[in-house]
Image (cartoon, rainbow, N blue to C red):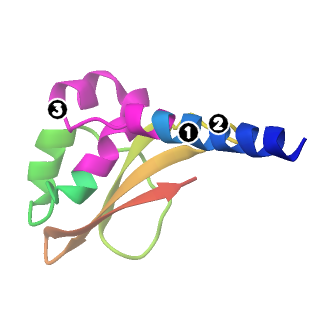
């Protein structure tokens, strides 16, 4: 019985890892603009490659298109909806938050809403 439980848990972990790996893509501007519900697949690449750092607001708007309406207060920022990531448990709308300092992108982060 214990071996079956361990096997099931191991299988669940392997399947989760595969799903995560298949749900990550390199940034593609055309795909970003035309398929907004699948943007979550490209967000990790955008952050890890530091693609947006140092760009102006206008550069971001040209590259990523029209942002979502944001209810966040405080820092100068733009928010893009990433769609809902697949999950075994609950689904969350993900957002990409681009923060500006001195009119240039200084930080890019994920957020669940």
Q: Which mark is residue 14?
A: 1
Left/right placement of residue 1 relative to residue 49 reads: right
Is 93 or 2 nearer to us in this picture? 2
Expressed as whole percent of the image width and height from the top left, the position of residue 71 reads: 50, 59
| Part of the protein shown in magenta | 19-45
Instruction: Specify whether residue 39 is painted magenta.
Output: yes
Location of residue 83 with respect to 45 vertically, above or below: above
Residue at image position (90%, 41%) is 1
Location of residue 92 with respect to 28 vertically, above or below: below
Disc 1 packing (10 Å; few <14; some 14–19; many ≥20): few
How many numbered dots are placed on residues in this image? 3
Q: Which residue is mark 3?
A: 29
Q: Classify mark 3: helix, strand or loop.
A: helix
Q: Which residue is mark 2?
A: 11
Location of residue 3 with respect to 30 vertically, above or below: below
Residue at image position (46%, 40%) is 20
Which image quadrant for residue 54? Answer: bottom left
- The first of marks 3 and 2 along the sequence is 2
Q: Are marks 2 and 1 in contact (CB under 8 Å)?
A: yes
């Amino acid at each position: 019985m214990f071996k079956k439980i361990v096997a099931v848990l191991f299988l669940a972990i392997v399947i989760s890892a595969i799903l995560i790996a298949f749900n990550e893509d390199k940034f593609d501007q055309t795909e970003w603009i035309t398929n907004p519900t699948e943007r979550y697949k490209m967000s990790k690449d955008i952050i890890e490659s530091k693609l947006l750092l140092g760009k102006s607001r206008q550069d971001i708007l040209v590259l990523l298109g029209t942002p979502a309406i944001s209810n966040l207060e405080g820092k100068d920022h733009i928010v893009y909806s990433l769609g809902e990531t697949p999950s075994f448990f609950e689904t969350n709308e993900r957002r990409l938050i681009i923060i500006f300092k001195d009119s240039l992108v200084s930080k890019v982060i994920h957020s669940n809403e």
